[in-house]
Structure formats: C-alpha cells, structure tokens
Amino acid sequence: MKKRNTVQLLGIMSILILISVQVFIIRGIWKQKDEMFALRYTTWSQEAFNYIRRGMSTDGFDTVRLLLANYSEKANKELHAIKDEKELAVKKKDILDYFTKVVNQEQDLSGLLSSYFEMRGFEKNFKYTIVINNLEMISNDTIVVYQSEDFSKRPPPDRGGRTGPSEISKSKIFVTWRWMEDNNYRFFIDYYIDFSDKQKVILKETAASLAMSTLSILVVVIIFMITYKNLMEEKRLSNLKTDFINNMTHELKTPLSTITVAGKTLEMVQIRNNDAKILETAKLIGKQSIHLNQLINMILEISMWERTQFQLDKKTVEIEEIMNDVVDSFRSGGGNGASINQKYNFGGAKVDLDIVYFTMLINNLLSNAVKYSDKDPVIDIEGFAKDNNICIKVSDNGIGINKIDQKHVFDKFYRATTGNIHKFKGLGLGLYYVKKIAEAHGGDVTVSSKPGKGSIFTITLPY
Ligand code: ADP
C-alpha cells in the first residue's frame, strides 16, 4: 500500500512538474509573440505616419488645432481672471475636458492610419486612445492646467526629444506623440492604438506549439496511467499467487498429515492385532490419497489448460437427464445437508456437452452454494430453454458476494477474502473452472448477488 502510494505520488508530482514547465514555456512563447506583434505594429504605424505626413502634408491634427485656437483665447482669459482656488480647479477641469474631447473626436489620424493599414493588407480594426500628458495655458504667466506623473519624468522634447512613453502599456501600442502650441496654450499628447483581435492573432500563431505541448502532456499522462495500471495488475496477480500457494500448501498438508498419522498408527503393536482398526486406517489412507490425488490433478489440469485449448469430448444429451444425474450424485455424495429444489424444465432440449466437464461445472456451483453458507443451505436450480440457449440458474441463501468481488470471482486464484484468514477453505479455482468450461462450450456464466442475501449464478449454453 505504501509503495503504491509512493508510485502514485511520484507520478502525479512529475506530471505536475511537466505541466508547469509546459505552461512556463507557452507563457514565454505567448509573451514573445505579443511583443513581436506590438513591435510589428509600432514599425508599421511609424511607416504609416511618415507616409501620411509626406503624402498629405498633415499629421492628422489640423482640425484639432483650428478648434482649440477658437476656444483657447477666451478660456485663457477667464482662467487668468479667477482668484478663488476652488473656482480655479473647476475651470482647469473644464479646459482639460474640452481639450481631451476635441483631440479624441476631431483628429483624422485614426482614419488615415486605418486606410493605410487596409491598403497594405494589415489588420485595420483598432481602437485608439489619446492621452494628454501636459496642458498649459499661456498669457503673461503660465498656468499648468494638468500634468501627468509620467510626463514630469520624461526629458522635454526640446532637449533630445522622445520616442514614446517610458513604460509601454501591455495591450496598447504607442504610435506617436505631439507637441502643439499657439499663443494661448501649449500641450503634449501620446497617441496609442489597441487591437481587439490581437489575442486571436497571437493564438493562431501559437496554436501549433500549444497543440504540441498539450499532446505531449496527454501522451505522458496516458503512458503513466497504463504503466501504473500494469504495475497494480502485476501486484494483484503476485498477491493472488502467494495466496494460492499458501492455500494449496494448507490443502495438501491436511490429507498428507492424516496419511502420516495413519502410517504411524499401523506401526503400533496394539493396532496390528486389531483387524477392524487396520481396515479402518487403510480406508482412511485410501480416502486421503484420493483427495490428494484430486488436488494434484486439479493443479496439473490448470497448467495444462493454460498451455493448450480445451479438448472437449462432446456428446448430444438431454440436458434434463444430465442435470438430474448430477444433482442426484451430489445429494448421494453428502450434499452437506443442503435442501436442493429442482425447478427446471428444459422441454426435452438436447445439448452437445462434455459430460465430465459439465458435471464438474454444476458440482462446483453446488459445493460453493453449500460451502459459502452460514445457515442451512437452500439451493434452487432453475432452468429453461430459450432462443437457441439453455439457461441454468443456481441460487443459494448463503453469505453473498459484494459488488467489487463479483467482478473478480471468476479470475484464477481469486478468493473473496484473501490469505489464510479465509474461514472457508479453497484455492480460488472453482469458479475459474466454471467460467472456462462454460466458455469452452460456447456459453458464459454471470453472477448477481447481495451480501447476506445469497447469490445467483447463471449459466447460458447454446444448443
Ligand atoms: P474457492 O471456493 O476455492 O475460494 P472459487 O473460485 O470457487 O474458489 O470461488 C471464488 C470466490 O468466490 C470464493 O473465495 C468465495 O469468496 C466466492 N464465492 C463463490 N461461490 C460463492 C457463493 N455461492 N456464495 C458466496 N461466495 C461465493
């Protein structure tokens, strides 16, 4: 159990590490593609911007300049006349709002850029943002209406100029900046574009790597699961084998020790003169030898079945007759006080059967019904012929089998409670035989059961 948990834990951990590494790689690729996308569009928009300036001798802000010139003279005078701080703040906000509205609504740059992108066959649908970084109203003195934090850190355009904001925003692509002024105002703006389809484009570009990593993770997970399953199956089989050897040793030891004790008894002087005792002991030795022989034959037969296909000696027989014979001989062989109800009616159906193996099949079911019983065993045998099939149901009132064990009871060496602690003796081979025999006849066997309520074994055979 401990080993199993360690293997499971190690496997899950390595898969998690693998997934994390893949996620890390994919994120790296995504980031790279994202940066390349931004770089591409920065270059293209720069190209576009130069083209527009050269070809049309405009920067796209002509209308803006006109509107601001009309507005700013009056606004500037009003601003300079205000003394009250509160009023001043309100006026500053009005002026900034107007400037922001005009630069965002009245510029032609976005339309011109979009047409240029379309002409070159690039993605042309973008959103634009214009950010005012600094706005001053000029008269005899200058009133700063607004200044962004970022702006104060940048070098002024007249000293070395600038090519973009200090920190490029994640989704926005910086295109250009403008410094505009006339007699009444001076202001500074940044122009950005933002592609709503950017994620889709990047997804398309990374799809191949994404699919490959998902596939590789999937393959590793599948390989791990198969290996783990095989490992567990091997472990289960090895446990079953150990249990089988323990049980078999126990089964073989019982008759052997009886024979040894009987041999010793025969050596005793008192016994040698007592004919009746000698006969009794000899019978005991004979009986135990037969039992021992049966056990050894069973084991030999199993190994033979493993190597070669079943050799059936089939004869066409009336199934009802055979069933009666098998049940009668089971009763006369003791039947351990079981009450057996024969409720079958096969309507004279004739079936091709190997009588020896079929007898063994029914005998195994009957002896299990008696063996796995905690009260007086009552066995019902039902049977009928239907649609080219013979159906035989053997029901008991025994201890029953739980759902998990039901799946395995027909496996070789499987016992519902494993190991020597099993209070019912056995080798875990009886039902394995039943299944093999039924299948060799072209049929099958199934079980349905409820713990504490009894079990029903159903045999179907073609006829
Ligand atoms: P064995 O009886 O030697 O253990 P079998 O192959 O005959 O081996 O049965 C496999 C297991 O199925 C048994 O160990 C037992 O737990 C369970 N089993 C079989 N028949 C019955 C039954 N009629 N009622 C309850 N349990 C059964």
Image (tube, helix red, strand yellow):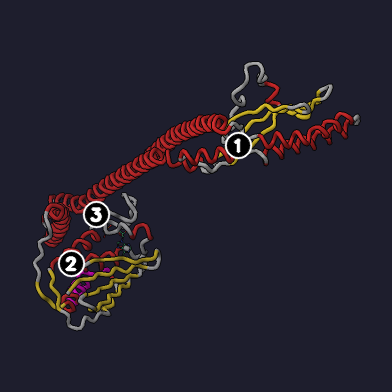
Report the residue marked by disc 1. 109
Report the residue marked by disc 2. 442
The N terminus appears in which quarter of the rendering? top left
The C terminus appears in which quarter of the rendering? bottom left
In-image side of 300 versus 191 (left or right)? left
x%, y% of residue 19? 43, 37
- The stretch of residues the image draws in magenta is 324-336
Q: Assign a secondary structure to mark 2.
A: loop
The image quarter in which residue 405 lies: bottom left
**In the rendered structure, does residue 325 fall within the stretch colored magenta?**
yes
Say which of marks 1 and 2 sits in front: 1
Q: Quadrant of ligand 1?
A: bottom left
Query: For the residues marked 2 and 3, what is the alpha-carbon distance in whole angstroms?
Result: 19 Å
User: Which comes sooner in the sequence, label 1 or label 2?
Assistant: 1
Mark 1: amino acid? Leu
Does the numbered disc 1 mark a residue whose Cβ is under 8 Å from ligand 1?
no
Query: For the residues marked 3 and 1, what is the alpha-carbon distance in whole angstroms?
Result: 82 Å
Is 128 above or below relative to 285? Answer: above
Along the line of sight, the residue nearer the viewer: 377 or 171 = 171
Q: Are marks 1 and 2 in contact (CB under 8 Å)?
A: no
Residue 156: tell me if it is visible.
Answer: yes
Instruction: Identify the residue at image location x=31%, y=71%.
Output: 395
